């Protein structure tokens, strides 16, 4: 059974990091990062 996982933040399917889907609150790791962690690290990296 291959249930489609949709990101709660952007609504797109989560495929690459499906294993981490639950870890990241049903979001892409990046969406999770932007939602919860990115606020404090804007000056630290330019990946997104
Ligand atoms: Zn997303
Ligand atoms: Zn960030």
Image (spheres, rainbow, N blue to C red):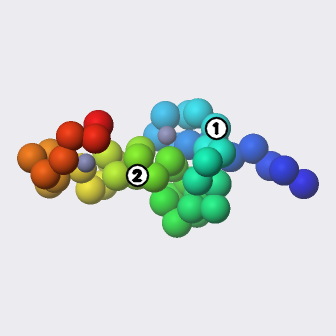
Q: Residue furthest bottom?
A: 23
Mark-to-mark CA distance, 2 and 1: 14 Å
Residue in the image at 50% along x and 58% along y: 25
Q: Is residue 20 left or right of residue 48?
A: right
Per the rendering, the mark at residue 47 is none
Tag 1, which secondary structure? Answer: loop
Q: Which residue is mark 2?
A: 32
Q: Quadrant of the C terminus?
A: top left
**Which residue occupies 53% across, 43% down?**
8
Which quadrant, please, contains the N terminus?
bottom right
Query: Left or right of 5: which side holds 40?
Result: left
Q: Which of disc 1 and disc 2 is earlier in sequence?
A: 1
Whether residue 18 is visible to the viewer of this picture, yes or no, is yes
* Residue 36 in picture, x, y percent from top left: 30, 55
Secondary structure of residue under mark 2:
helix
Which residue is tagged 1? 13
The reply, left or right, for residue 19 in relation to residue 41 is right
User: Which residue occupies 49% across, 34% down?
Assistant: 10
């Amino acid at each position: 059974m291959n249930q489609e996982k949709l990101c709660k933040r952007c609504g797109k399917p989560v495929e690459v990091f499906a294993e981490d889907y639950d870890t990241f609150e049903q979001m892409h790791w990046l969406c999770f990062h932007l939602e919860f962690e990115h606020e404090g690290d804007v000056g630290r990296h330019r990946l997104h």
